[in-house]
Image (cartoon, rainbow, N blue to C red):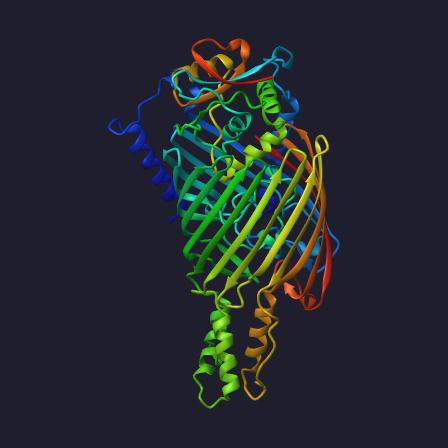
Amino acid sequence: MKRYIDFIHFIILIVCCYMYLTPSICLADSKEDIKEIAVVVNSKNPIVSLTSKQVSDIFLSRRRTFPSGGAVMVLEQERDGAIREKFFNLLNGMNLKRLNAYWTRLQFSGEIQPPPVMSDSVAVKNAVKDNINAIGYLPSQYVDESVRVVLILK
Amino acid sequence: MKPLKYLIFAFILFNLIWINPGTRFEIEPARLYADDLSGLKISGYGTISTSFDDREFICPARDIGQSPDNNKRYSKDWSTLMDSRFGLQAHYRANPDLDFVVQGVLRDQAYVTFKNSLESAYFAFRPNSWLELRGGRIGYDAFLMSDTRNLGYAYSWVRPPVEFYGWIPIFHIDGADTTFRLNGEDSQWRFRLQAGEQGLMFPIDKVDFDSSTRGLHAMTISRQSGDILLKAGYSKFSFKNEFALFSNLHSGEGYRGLEQLMADSTLSSEILEEARYLRDNLTFKDIDITYLTFGASYDDGDWILQGEIAQSTSSAEVFSHGRMAYAALGYRIGDFTPYFMFSAIRAGNDIRKPLADWSSLEESWLQSQSISIINTTRMDQDTLSFGVRWDFHLQAALKFQLDATKMHSNGYGLYFSKGETSYVDSRITLGTISMEVMF
């Protein structure tokens, strides 16, 4: 058994070294650039607006339908991205460390797998535009008439 | 059903549903823009841990699947084995309604085999927004944390309280479950039914026991409302097999076992009655074991509170059962979360004492040995834990925890002990440093 544990230690040390050498927060979107975050749904979705609590429940996978009863397809931003950090901070006060611990429980217990992670805000907007069940978030400056804003976080 | 069969089953199902053009789901337009809406994800978690204690002849274990005496832990006052583990998961999202998941965990167990290390291998299908069906090897979901026991990064403390989780012999279910979800005004309800079996081999006092179950099922209902989660569960199962050590006492070779004594009408009614009682309570095969539990947790970002109470019953005294509970409180100060936790268990059966005088029998040792075994599996102990978690990285945390445990005499079912130690009250202090990562 000892050799297995030695192997575990070796693997985890490699992972830790990788983490140490990797920046904690993506610099693609600096927090200073993000004034407002818009929560957007497909323009054909009957939902006109959502409360912060409803959006929080949806993005924490506690609620899996819109208030109208329609299925929800959540679209996430990069796990360590500044936009994600700002979004959850404004939405429910969760920081990324707490959020990662929360999702670790859901993901590895089989409760639900994390939502698809989009490469950037443009990809979020395009996916929301083309999927009636989708919901995503992005800086307000990315919003146009192709998607519907249901909540603004400042 | 062997794990390999699950993989084959999952692979065939995947082919039927996804690859086969006749049954293939329509690709939604969004996938044209984002590759991540379907595809394979590899992720994992791990723990490096070192524990040290201040007692000889007493050895802590994280759960019943471990066998500290195999690793000569009695003779050492520190160990890296107890809490260290490494888990790797592959998740394939076929479409928004269908997932395939395989997860393996390398950790200290009496026998490290592929079968024991395969934590889950299942498909999850959601035909609509309120129903989910899973099949394969799935997590055992009877308690608040029973399917997250390995996920150290997910909770504040070093390990789930041993008094509550350490002795539950079910780690996963080879079967299926159904989950119903309902949305209330400001709350979400979840009902889950699980059924299947589990077959693990682990040693009890260096004798292997095939713990294959029969009729394993669990039902849970949970309610999430903002920061508050409430969960109640009920589970029942029985074992298919007898423990070899008990079989020898039931029916001896070269001596009369309990069953032969029960058939001897020349014996006094007191001896016959006690022999029957010992026979009926010294068995694992076909006994009914139940767990009834209620748990609650609260996390508002600053305060963390969690607690559970449970009652376990067994139709034979020798299988550990009783009432257990724990309560934990933590407070986040920046990246640091100091916490304390108290957990306790009380045996569901009284200490057994001889009822009849067997001194006239050649097999008088059967009485003392049978009673000794029944008393050995009793659990009666408390643990007070203090600790701190430091989230020094987005995906890594360091923890330090100190556990002060008091074991009452004839209540050492949770700690491994040598010699006569278990006949007197004992105290043990256990310190643990661990680093948790997820990726």
Relative image position of residue B58 (x, y in whole percent): 69, 59
Q: Quadrant of residue B107?
A: top right
Total number of numbered labels? 0
Image quarter where the C terminus of chain A lies is: top right
Relative image position of residue B209 (x, y in whole percent): 49, 60
- Tell me what residue is drawn at x 62 percent, y 30 percent: B395
Q: Residue furthest right?
A: B54
User: Taking B369 as reference, is B75 above or below it?
Assistant: above
User: Taking B207 as reference, is A117 above or below it?
Assistant: above
Q: Is residue B360 left or right of residue B121?
A: right
Q: Quadrant of residue A29?
A: top right
Relative image position of residue B97 (x, y in whole percent): 38, 31
Q: Nearer the viewer, residue A87 or B3?
A: A87
Q: Residue furthest left?
A: B22
User: Taking B150 as reference, is A74 above or below it?
Assistant: above
Q: Nearer the viewer, residue B163 or B69?
A: B163
User: Taking B383 as reference, is B119 above or below it?
Assistant: above
- Tell me what residue is drawn at x 51 percent, y 44 percent: B147
Q: Quadrant of residue B318?
A: bottom right
Q: Residue furthest bottom?
A: B266
- Tell me what residue is drawn at x 65 percent, y 49 percent: B327
Relative image position of residue B75 (x, y in whole percent): 70, 56
Q: Is residue B235 left or right of residue B431?
A: left
Q: Is residue B365 left or right of residue B404?
A: left
